[in-house]
Amino acid sequence: MAIDMQPESDRQPGREPGGREPDAPPPPARPWWRRPAVHTALAGAVIGYLLGHLLGNVIAGQYSQVVNSGQNDYAIVLGYVLGTLGWLAGLGVFSDLLRQMTGRPVHATEEARDASAGLARYFRYSLDHKVVGLQYLVGMIGFFLTGGLLAMAIRTELLSPSYHVFSSATYTAIVGEHGTMMMMMMSSLILGPLGNYLLPLMIGSKRMAFPRIEALSFWLTPAAYIVLLSGLMFGGFPFGWTGYAPLSVQATQGADAYAVAFGIMGISLILLGFNIIVTVICYRAPGMHWGRLPIFVWAMLTTSFLMVLAAPVLVGAMYMLITDRTVQTAFFTDDLGGSSYLWENLFWFFGHPEVYILALPGFGVVSEILPVFCRKPLFGYKVAAAGMVGVTLLSFFVWQHHLFDSGINPDMRPVFMLTTELISIPTGFIFLVAMGTFWKAKIRFTVPMLFALGFYFNFLIGGISGVYLSDVPADTTEHGTFFVMAHFHYTIMGGLIFAFMAGLYYWLPKMMGIRLNQTLGKIHFWTMFVFFNATFLPLFAVGMAGQPRRVYTYARSLETLNDWVSISSFLLGVSILIFVFNFVYSTVIARVHEEGNPWNSRGLEWQVSSPPPPGNFARVPVVLSGPYEYGVKDAPPVADLDPPLGVISNAYAAAAAEGAEV
Amino acid sequence: MSLAARVTTLIVAVLAVVGGVIFVVAHYLLGGPPTVDFAAATSGQVNVTMQTDASSDPATVPDHPTWVSYFIKSPASGSWVHTTLFQVPAHTRVNVTILGYDGSTPVRNQVWGQVSGTTGGVADYGGKPVKTVNGWNGPYLIQHTFAIPSLNLSVPVEAGPATCTTGPCTNNQHSTTTFSFMTPAQPGAYRWQCFVPCGLSYLDGNGGPMQTFGYMTGNMQVVS
Amino acid sequence: MPAADGTVADGAGRPEPNHGLRIFLLWLPVALVADLLIWFVWGPHLPPGAMSTSAATQQSAIKIMSVMAAPVMALVLVYGAYALVVWRHREGDDEDGPPIHGNTRVSVTWIGVTSVIVLSLAVFGTVELAGPAGAGAGEGNTPIWRPSGGTPLQVQVIGQQWRWTYRYPQFGGFETTSLMLPVGENVQFNITSLDVIHSFWAYQLGVKADANPDINNVAYTKPEHTGQVQVRCAELCGLWHADMTTVGQVVSLSAFNAWTATARTQLAALTKELPPYTLTYDPNAVAQLGKVFQKAGLSGAGGGFYGSQYPVQP
């Protein structure tokens, strides 16, 4: 069943996946500017956009709707779509496919991998999961900082209810850009960089299952990012990240940017999740059975199922929105047989799993880090895995709690109230596991551990406030207010981002062989923890006091609280700047090398050198014991990195002789 | 790479990012139509003259010439400015004259056919005072409404005899709607908008110009 | 985990304290004090107040959930603080911790307790929802939880970009921009929209219901005190979403009757021009629409987004 189950030497020599045929001629040497990379991709994007725009004008330029409104959504959408395809073509995504179709030897991606050691490979369509992981890392940090800057702009406007730095139009555009940027791009914040980089290392594989899909899932994200931001040039979109129709059908061209960007990102999520699922199922090293899977891998697997099952609904909804806006399909127009409820249902059917796409990887990271710094086995490993599976299943049955006031089918409300409250049981497992792991532990306050502890504190508040929102009577006051906003910032900013930081401080020595400065890290943690709470805790009160979400002006009586929040948020921004400084300083200037196992971790990924050699493991390892056996007397090493030849085939033969299914 | 090369690359990258952010903030976030200043009141009154046009001269309004739009006459230069932002003193009587160069569109909600919040509760259509206009049936047809909801001000604007498509227009083929109201004592920005669905080819007629500053909605800035 | 595992001597011979008992003794006063404060000090002032039956329901729901949440939060925080202080790594100790892989008894207890809390919350929420006629939330066009006794006062709430108007069908169907309600009467809001999705939120009344185009969303409440009501829009509806506010009034029944009588007379001219009262609001149902179209050569009061066949031409 599994492809990479057998050690290298047991296998027939053959073509490396994604590589060229052994007897194919070597690729021609070309100057750097003729090799596909970011610059050719940009050129492809520009050509594609212009072509699409032209096509749209030819098709629809004379439609009365286009002439009257002075906006040609056809041209813009086609421009975005062809621009994205041009971007991918410029990167060389399709080169191998075309070569295979025309029967020529495949070499373009091989060339991209071989001929560009050093920095240049990070700007190419690389099939190496470690390169993609770092590409994702830098990309995601960039997307996060962009969203963060927009958040600063939001808080600047909210400093005063009467004096306006931005107009209400600009403000709603900023709110929409911030929300969409954070919700759609941050879905891959952990699975993109840490997942792609670490998953093969954690399960003892030499690579991900589908290197091309992996690289494609990354290269779609800059396209989505640019498309989304380009909406600002058309005045942005006035409907937040939720894009409620018919407002999103009514809006100006910025809405096209929203729909196309979200759609592209949805496709990227599907590809990312799909690849991870197959990798986890098929690419585990011998001995890495389900009961030994690191808990972070469980989190990645469950999150990936959410992505693969939920994101198609999003892509479909975005497609319907685009056709409503262009060819007037009226999916969301009540008068013509459509329904505004349809969008709400489609969107939240994606949207609620989406918030668990954001939460589950965080659970995984902190649960993975906890045993290392408690020097104890993870308490209730099966409970933790079951909790994640439970959350995954339940998250598809709760979406109507976003619509408690909408008037959809009121007699189903107790049911959705129940499912929503039920989901707090598996979520509570995460706390059970943490508290059990703390019991008589030897807790070391390293920077990753501090962030993990911060995660638990924040997620406790975020989770408990979520229970309020699940209750219909309480939700009637809190729905659509800053209370909701504070709640999901506690789970996403306080949860996901804190977990990401924990993971980054923990795994960056593995990924880059470079250690982040720990003193700056501690300053970063304490400022971020304090100002995060100072920013978002008062927002529960602001929401309860009656401030709706996404408003550029508010009741004068709430000015003091809002000012407090704004100033705290600026200081939170300073804290993020400390992180950026630390990251850049440590990786570019100081470069303190860290090659061994600085945390003395039992994780399989830490058993190889940092950064891992090409192919990760010289031989596919045989996993001998679980990753959390701290303090266990006579625990075997986590894996045999140099298994004797034939050990696996012999084991399989023995098992087959006993009649076991292999 | 050597340390010097790395630091140089870093500085260039930082400058590029900072420059990009400043560019975006300056261009997209702080840009917008100008504000016409009526703050210098004469004898406790200001006279505001506006016009509505079905579409505009692309030379004057390069962004969206096909959109229906307001223009405000600058008291200083006497020229028509393409904006919907104006500034008036607090607690002052404002005499508004709206020259209608646009054709008629019915309101979505007939409530907005009623004049409210003006001095005397009426508006003048070419000299004739009106209280309630049926925008669906006449005798007067309306093209837009001028409404400042927080002052409960709402005035339907009479449709013009002809449609002028090259705003700002200066011919006399227009309707004239006049009314007066008192500005509030509290300084601040007071939004005004139109309740007629005049964003042609936008769903419900409320997109495009109806939600964009400089066209059919804006702010009345009240200063003390 | 507060599993009482007794006093087990550790390697140094010093008796291991009963951590479970100590955590319990730390937690108990914290939880008690927190609950007493929430119930007696904070509870009566919790939003959204008690101006109406639905607001009072929401206030009590928030209060009761806080009382249940506080001990849980206190347990996790006290446990965490205790762990960080007592079980922190000490300098020179390079031993790993005890290899505890799990404890079925503790896990089962935890799952059992959280399940009981969660299920009781769900039952409580359902009771609170059904009892006071839907707790002020929008119930769609076929409400299943209705107030008992008599015909309620009907108020149609019409959301449009960007203002609320109110129609009183039991008083001749006049439409106005001000919201006026009598105290002590059941009120039935019929919420609808002319364009995009809004959300009618009468804060002090504890009423929140989305206004969807072509949909009649019903919400019930019963004001029990006179005073001002802040009405806001709780669903982003475009440019002036933040400004879509009204101040409503809850007044005595006699004052309300006087107001309706005056408004009915004053707005008589306007009421004649309005379309007949329907549960959803269709501006295109106006009989004279065709005349306007012919006169002005227009595609209609919909902006013409869907071409000349929309809205339906007479």
Image (spheres, rainbow, N blue to C red):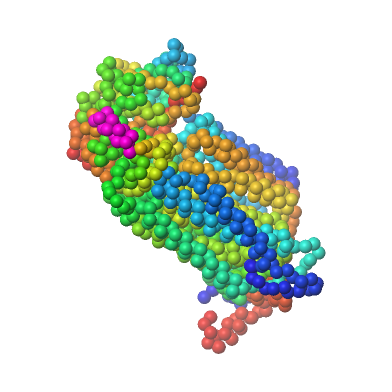
Left or right placement of residue C170 versus residue C133 in this view: left
Q: Is residue A652 above or below residue A221?
A: below
Between residues C242 and A471, which one lies in front from this camera angle?
A471
Tell me, yes or no, if residue C102 can be seen here. Answer: yes
Q: Is residue A422 above or below residue A586?
A: below
Residue C145 magenta-highlighted: no
Tell me, yes or no, if residue A31 can be seen here. Answer: no
Residue C271 placement: quadrant: top left
Between residues A156 and B152, which one lies in front from this camera angle?
B152
Left or right placement of residue A212 versus residue B101 in this view: right
Left or right placement of residue A10 versus residue C135 in this view: right
Q: Main secondary structure of the magenta part?
A: helix
Among all residues in the image, which is located at the extreme bottom? A658
- Provide residue C90's location: percent of width, then percent of height: 77, 62
The residue drawn where x is 62% and y is 64% is A434
**Part of the protein shown in magenta:** C253-268
Residue A4 placement: quadrant: bottom right
The residue drawn where x is 41% and y is 58% is C127
Between residues A55 and A397, which one lies in front from this camera angle?
A397
Between residues C314 and A155, which one lies in front from this camera angle?
A155
- Provide residue C177's location: percent of width, then percent of height: 34, 34
- Provide residue A590's location: percent of width, then percent of height: 74, 49
Count of numbered badges drawn on the protein: 0
Residue C263 magenta-highlighted: yes
The residue drawn where x is 31% and y is 26% is B115
- Provide residue A143's location: percent of width, then percent of height: 56, 47
The residue drawn where x is 40% and y is 45% is C52
